[in-house]
Image (cartoon, rainbow, N blue to C red):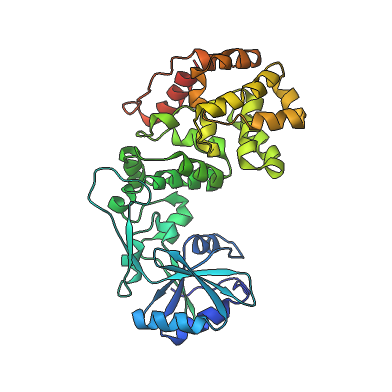
Amino acid sequence: MVRELPSGFLAAGLESFLQKARAQGLIPVLVGGAVRDLLAGATQVTDWDFELHGGDLRAWEQLLDSLRADHQLKTLGKGVVQAHHRASRTPIDFALPRREHYPLRDTYAHGDVETSADPSLDFAAAGLRRDFTLNAMGLALKQEAIELWDPFGGEEHLRQRVLHPCDSIHFAKDPVRALRAHRFAVRDGLGFTPELTEILEHMDLALLTSHYVGEEARKSRHPFRFWNAIQELATLPVKFQGGVHAVDAMEAAYDRALPAIGHSNALLAAVFAASEGWHLLQSLGGKGEKESSLWRDRREAARQLAHMSPAAVLADPQAFAQMCQLVRGPGDWPKHDWVRWALQPLGLEWWSTRPWPEIDLRDFPAPERHTRKVAAWLS
């Protein structure tokens, strides 16, 4: 299907790459979020990711040789090469069509996959490894025309504003894709098709890590809404359970603080201002240290801050900087005697008195899970 795109949308230096690829008989196909964004009305592309079709390994090697004359090449892994034109700062990522192979096991973590290039794969077969149909479209930048390649109906799903998996079996093997689904839902207001909802209900998320929860929350641009959204996942590990009540106020505080102090400290500012959500700081902020020495080193800072109100701490740069140093594994806080008298003046005594039982809500209907988790954490 031939498409017209905004004039001048090609980045500086990109035409040289396209010409060299075509000279080797390769078809450069723009893939990923750039295609989705262009079809949604964007006028610029920030991520230039190409899949090269129609050639073989010899054509690939000849392309690399020709690019070295005026590009700097860098291998990124999993068969992806990045090229920087010497007259432009715009990076171009490109690869041959790829297959993904998962080992035989019961539970998978993100990254438990091997990738192999296969020039013989057509666009549809190569697209089965992608997550959602609206991320599996391609724009073939041929010399004579620009064609939309859409083997899974992604453009229609984009019009319907819904997320739909390219392949249900492949999708379910990567637990981070459950987080990506909620990231797009929160950031772009997208819904889920019944097929995706069914997959998310039964995905094995046991090996999710705080790193990826935090990364997807940051990319969602609304970390506290994202956190509340993932509470609907039936198999969410206990360490990530427990929503927040004052989500709108926390998002507003986060937005105000973000430009000046960065993501992790903006999370802390929002949590401290609302006096709730301490349990999610480790996961959303990427703070994973749990050594007892860190707690001892921060005891004095906690003593100095204990008599101050949240508003006073946020208004005092030095006090706020001290508070930022306390973002360390809140799941361990009840183990320390000083936590109770440090947090009680702030109205946070519930933190140190809760027994913190494990919560398993898989048997509850999805609409009830968020409310029940909030009550369980804050009661």
Which image quadrant is residue 40 in? bottom right
- In the depicted structure, whether residue 239 falls above or below residue 83: above
Count of marks, rendered view: 0
Residue in the image at 51% along x and 45% along y? 215
Q: Which percent across, then down, holds residue 367?
A: 41, 29
Q: Which percent across, then down, holds residue 164?
A: 38, 51
The answer, for residue 144, to whether it is visible in the render is no
Which image quadrant is residue 322 in? top right
Q: Looking at the figure, which quarter contains the N terminus? A: bottom left
Viewer-closest of 237 and 365: 237
Residue in the image at 59% along x and 73% along y? 10
Residue in the image at 58% along x and 44% along y? 221
Q: Which percent across, then down, holds residue 223?
A: 56, 39
Q: Which percent across, then down, holds residue 192?
A: 41, 45
Viewer-closest of 39 and 99: 99
Left or right of 155: which side holds 38? right
Which residue is farthest bottom?
23
Viewer-closest of 333 and 138: 333
Which residue is farthest left?
104
The answer, for residue 131, to whether it is visible in the render is yes
